[in-house]
Amino acid sequence: MKRWLWLAVLAWPGLAPAQETPEAAADALWRALSHGPNAGADREALQALFAPGAQVYGLSEREGRRVLRQRSAAEFVEAQAKPGAGAFHEREVHREVRRYADFAEVFATVESRTDAGADKADFTGINSLHLVEQDGRWRILSLYYALERPGQPLPAAWRGRPSGKASPTPPRE
């Protein structure tokens, strides 16, 4: 019984472990989205990361055209939490952070893989997170992502280091 009560406390968005920095919130996002086969993203962790009313935007290709998709964070979380046959692993390889008072932007290059140990990513994309600090906790107001396209490679500076580790984050402004 105590275990279930503790899990319920951690899952409650207002009581979830605090993301004390924008960087910690970004790290938590990649962890929450990653999952093994026959599983989905961590619904509770994602719900705790997004602020009420948050939005998610993404570009996709449809019939040769770029289409902007907009949905609520709640819709995004539900879609990501649905179990799928394959695994999904996110790894950040480059990060830039800009911060002013209780507002921050995290601009990150993320590689996605179905096999966490694979050398080559299945796809690479850019993510831009806007965050706000409230009560000592950083939460995502909006997430925008765009996948790298054939013929439009990401700039070399955004590709990270060959080791696959994220580039050092610049000091706070």
Image (spheres, rainbow, N blue to C red):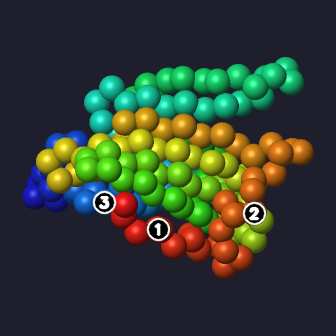
Q: SS at mark 2?
A: helix
Count of numbered circles in the view = 3
The residue indicated by pointer 3 is 21
Q: Nearer the viewer, mark 3 or mark 1?
A: 1
The quarter holding residue 57 reads top right
Q: Is residue 10 visible?
A: no
Q: SS at mark 3?
A: loop
Residue 85 is situated, as x and y percent measured from the top left of the image, at 64, 46
Left or right: 22 as drawn, with respect to 9:
right
The residue under the point 66% across, 79% down is 163
Residue 51 is situated, as x and y percent measured from the top left of the image, at 30, 36
The residue indicated by pointer 1 is 170
Q: Nearer the viewer, mark 3 or mark 2?
A: 2
Amino acid, disc 1: Pro
Q: Mark 2 and mark 1 in contact (Cβ < 8 Å)? A: no
Amino acid, disc 2: Ala
Q: Is residue 132 above or below residue 22?
A: above
Say which label, 3 or 1, has the lower sequence index: 3
Q: Residue furthest front?
A: 173
Question: Who is closer to the viewer here, 122 or 69?
Answer: 69
Q: Which mark, residue 48?
A: none
Question: Who is closer to the viewer here, 34 or 165?
Answer: 165
The residue under the point 67% across, 31% down is 59
